Image (cartoon, rainbow, N blue to C red):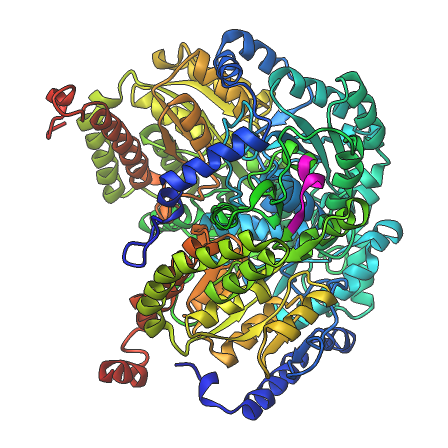
Amino acid sequence: MAQSAEHVLDHFELFRGPEYQQMLANKKKMFENPRDPAEVERIREWAKTPEYREKNFAREALTINPAKACQPLGAVFASVGFEGTLPFVHGSQGCVAYYRSHLSRHFKEPSSCVSSSMTEDAAVFGGLNNMIDGLANSYNMYKPKMIAVSTTCMAEVIGDDLNAFIKTSKEKGSVPADFDVPFAHTPAFVGSHVTGYDNALKGILEHFWDGKAGTTPKLERVPNEKINFIGGFDGYTVGNIREIKRIFELMAIQYTVLADNSDVFDTPTDGEFRMYDGGTTLEDAAKAVHAKATISMQQWCTEKTLPFIAHHGHEVVAFNYPVGVSATDEFLVALSRITGKDIPEELARERGRLVDAMADSSAHIHGKKFAIYGDPDLCYGLAAFLLELGAEPIHVLSTNGNKDWEAKMQTLFASSPFGQNCHAYPGRDLWHMRSLLFTEPVDFLIGNTYGKYLERDTGVPLIRIGFPIFDRHHHHRSPVWGYQGGMNVLVKILDKIFDEIDKKTNVLGETDYSFDIIR
Amino acid sequence: MSLATTQSIAEIKARNKELIEEVLKIYPEKTAKRRAKHLNVHEAGKSDCGVKSNLKSIPGVMTIRGCAYAGSKGVVWGPIKDMIHISHGPVGCGQYSWGSRRNYYVGTTGIDSFVTLQFTSDFQEKDIVFGGDKKLVKIIDEIQELFPLNNGITIQSECPIGLIGDDIEAVSRSKSKEYGGKTIVPVRCEGFRGVSQSLGHHIANDAVRDWVFDKVSPEGKPTFEPTPYDVAIIGDYNIGGDAWSSRILLEEMGLRVIAQWSGDGSLAELEATPKAKLNVLHCYRSMNYISRHMEEKFGIPWCEYNFFGPSKIVESLRKIAGFFDDKIKEGAERVIAKYQPLVDAVVAKYRPRLEGKSVMLFVGGLRPRHVIGAYEDLGMEVVGTGYEFGHNDDYQRTAQHYVKDGTLIYDDVTGYEFERFVEKVQPDLVGSGIKEKYVFQKMGVPFRQMHSWDYSGPYHGYDGFAIFARDMDMAINSPIWKRTKAPWKDVQKAKLLAAE
C-alpha cells in the first residue's frame, strides 16, 4: 500500500506503484482482448508517415479534433459584454450547460446563461411556449436589464422564428413591451463560434439602432467624435480590453467598447457573486450609432457586423488580431488618423521597449520554425508577429478559416522572406496538424490546451496561446494586444524556448556542458 | 463552525421551510407551483425525500442539467476506450465534452484507444437539408482506413439527427455487414430527448443491450476461463482513477474483476460481462438498466455498493462478500484490516480540522447520497443535498439510508435557489459542479467540484479516501477564505478574526 496520510499520493503518483501497475497489466492481458503490441507499434509508426498524411488529408467527411466550437458559444460570449445582460439560448438545455462549463473552465469565472429547455414536445409543436415561460422566468428571477436571445441547432432545424416568438412573448406579458430582447439566429451547423459572436453582436446593434424590431423609430445618426471598438471572440478579452482602454485613454480618445465582457469574466472574490458586472451600457450601445468610426480587432468575427455598421455611415476598419510591433503600429496609426489625436510619447516609449526586448532576444527566435492553429484572426496576428521576429510560421491552420483567410495568409507569407516556406490550412483539424508535425517537423507549436495532445504525440513543445486554455491559469488576465501585450507574447515564447534548451542540456555528465546559466 | 450546527433540529426545519417559501416568491405563480414540488425539508422516517423528480426543467430558470447526449456520449459510452465514438451532428457537443470528464484509461491514444479524441461529423447546412446518412457512411470508411485498430464504433446522435429523419440504424447495420460483423452502435441520444442526462444513460444502456449483447452468442466461449469469483464493476467511470482504486480492493478480497463499465473499459469487457457471477453497481442511476437486464436475461444478480469513505466501504465489502463463500468473506475482512491503519491515520490527521463542518451538495448520479458517509467519517455534516437528474428511487435511497432529519432537499435546483440557500444556510463547504464553483467561491464559500473531483481524485476506495480528506481540508481550511473582505471594508469581522 503506497497511500499514506502523511504524504497523500495524487492520481499521477498513486497508480504508478507496483500494485496498480500489476493490476492494470493483468486487466489488459486477461480481459481487454488487446491488440498485439507489435501491431500497435507498427500502426503508430505508420501514422507518422507521408503515406498516412496523404490519406489523412484525403478525408472528406470525418473531422477529428477540430479547433472550433459552435455559434451559440460566441453569441453568449458577446451578449455578456452588455450591461446587466442575460444570454438566453432558445433550444435544448444541454447546450447551455456546455457553454457555461466551457467558458468557466477557461476564465475560471462564473458564466451565467439560461436556456428555454426545449424537449420532445417542443420539437413537434415548436418552442413558443418555452420562450414565453422562459422569458418570464428569467426576467423575474435574474432581474436583467436586457435578455439577448440566440438559438441552438434544435430550434434552427425546426425553424422557430425568434422575432415572432419574442413579439408574442411580450404580448403575453413575459417581459414589459419596452424591455430589450435583441436576438440572433445562431445555427451550430453554419460557421463557428466566431460566426455566433458576429451574429449576436449584429443582432444587438440592429435592435438598438434600427427601431427595436419595429417598435420604435430607427435612430437618426448624429455623428460625433467617438470611436466604437469591437474585440471579437477572444480568450484574452479581460487583459486585452483593459489594455485597449488604457491606450484610448492615453490618446484621449472618446470611445465605446462594444460587448465589453472584460469585467464579467474577471470579478473579484470579496464575498459577493456578481452575476452581471461592467459591460457596455445599453445607452452606449444605442448611442454607438453616432460614432465616427468602428474598429474591429478581428475581421472574421465581424464579417456581418461591420458591413451593417458601415451601412449606418461609419468608417469601419478591421484588423486581424494585431500582435507585435508593426500590427500595433498600424492600429495606432489608424486610430490617430481617424481621431486626429496624436500618438503620445508614452506609447512611443512602450513601442521602443518592445523593440528593445525583441532585439535583445532575437537570436533565440530567429529562424525557429513554428506551427500555429486557432481562430482565423488569431492565427494571422501571431503569424505576422513571428515573421517580424524572424521566425517562420511554417504551418498555420484554422479549422474555421475559409478560402479568403487562406488567400490573406498567403499574401502575408509572400510579404516576408521568412514566409517563403509557410502554408495556410483552412478548414483542417488537429489530426491534420498531427500529420503536418510528423512529416514536416517544426520547433514549436502555438495553440490552445488541446495542443497538449499534439505535444505528447509529436514531441513538438506547445506554447499555449488561444482559446480555450483549461490547463494553465490566469493568462487571460494579461493582454496580448498593444506593445505591452506583444511583450507578454514574446516572453511566453521565449520562456518555452529557454525551457526547451535547458531540458535538452540537463543530463549530468552528458549534455550539461551546455547547461548555461546565462542565455 | 456554521450556523446550522448551533441550532436545534426544529429550528433548522423551520428555517429551511422558511427559506423554501422565500425562494419561491421570486417566481411567476405557475413556476412557483412547479418548483415547490421539488423543494422540501426531509422528515426522518419518511420513505423518500418528499420531492418530485425526473420532470422537465422549467425554461429560463438556469437549470444545471445537461442532455441525453451528455448522458450517453459523455457518461456511458465515451469512456469505452477501444471504440470510436462519433459525435454525430454539429461540432459543438463533441467539442464541449472533449476530454473534460477525466475518464482515465491506459492505451495508445489515437492508435488503439480513442477516449480523448473528438470525432465529429461537423454537420453543415447541406447535411441538415439533404440528410447526413451518406456522410456517416463515408465517416465510417474513413475511420476504418485511418484507425485500423479500433474495435468498434458508436454513433452518438446530436439534436438534429432525430429531427431530420436520418436512419443511422440502417447505416450501422449495412456498414457492420460490410466490415465483417464489426460492432457499430447507433445511439439515439439526441439532446432534446427526455428531461436531462438521465434518459441518455438509459438509451445508452439499451444500445449496449441491443447492439452489443445481442450480437454475442450466449454459448460463445469467453476469452478467459471462468471462475466462481468473477464480478463486473458497473457504473464506475474511472474519474481520476476511481475504478482502479475500487478494483484493487475487490481483487485483494479474492474476487476477479472481468469488466469495468465503463471507465477504462473495452468492448471485450462489455461482451464478457454476461459471464459474471455478480454485477457490483456503483452508479445506480446511470447503469441500473443494464444490470436489471442482465439479471432478467442471464440470471446475474447485482448489488449496489458505495466506496466513498471507510464506513461505507466496510459495509459494501461485507455486502459484496455476502454473495460468495467464506474464502471471499475472509478476504473482505482481511482487506478491511489491512487498510484500517490508513483509515485511522487519515481520520486522525483530518477529522480534527473538519469536525462539525457543514456541507451542501448538488451533484448528479449517485453522489448526492453516496458521498455523505465519507463526510461523516470526517466528522462533517451534510445539511442540504439534491440531484441534478435523480429519480424517485434515488430519493428513496437517500431518505432511507443517508440524510438526516431536517436536511434541505432541492431537486434540479435553479441557479437562483442554490445561491439563496447557500447564502442563508452558510455551509462551510459546497460540493457541486464547474458551473457552480466560481459563483460560491466569489461569495467566499469554500467549494469542491464533485463531478470531476476538481481535477483531483480518485475519491473511491481507501486510497481515494485519503485524497478526499486532504482535498476537503485544503478547500475549507485554505487561508484565503479569511481574506475575502478588505479589512477597511469589514471592520467588525476583521476584529473577530484578529481575536481568534
Q: From this view, report whether residue B171 is shown above or below residue B37.
A: above
The relative height of residue A309 versus residue A375 in the rendered view (above or below) is: below
Q: Position of residue A247 (x, y in %)?
A: 34, 47
Q: Quadrant of the C terminus of chain A?
A: top left
Classify residue A97 as left or right of residue A234: right
In this rendered view, identify the residue nearer to me: B270 or A264: B270
Q: Residue at coordinates 82% horizontally, 26% vertically from top-left? A: B173
Question: What is the magenta range?
Answer: B272-279
The picture places residue B81, in percent across and down from the top left corner, at 58, 33
- Report which quarter residue B213 is drawn in: top right
Residue B335 versus residue B420 in the image, above or below:
above
Residue at 11% x, 21% y is A509
Q: Is residue A329 magenta?
A: no
Q: Relative to residue A33, is residue A368 drawn left or right?
A: left
Camera-side residue of A317 and B6: B6
Is residue B345 or residue A335 the one in the foreground? B345
Magenta-span inclusion, residue B275: yes
Residue at (46%, 85%) from the top-left corner? Answer: B5
Q: Is residue B119 left or right of residue B3?
A: right
Residue nearest the observer in this picture, A73 or B183: B183
Residue B260 image point, x, y percent: 59, 42
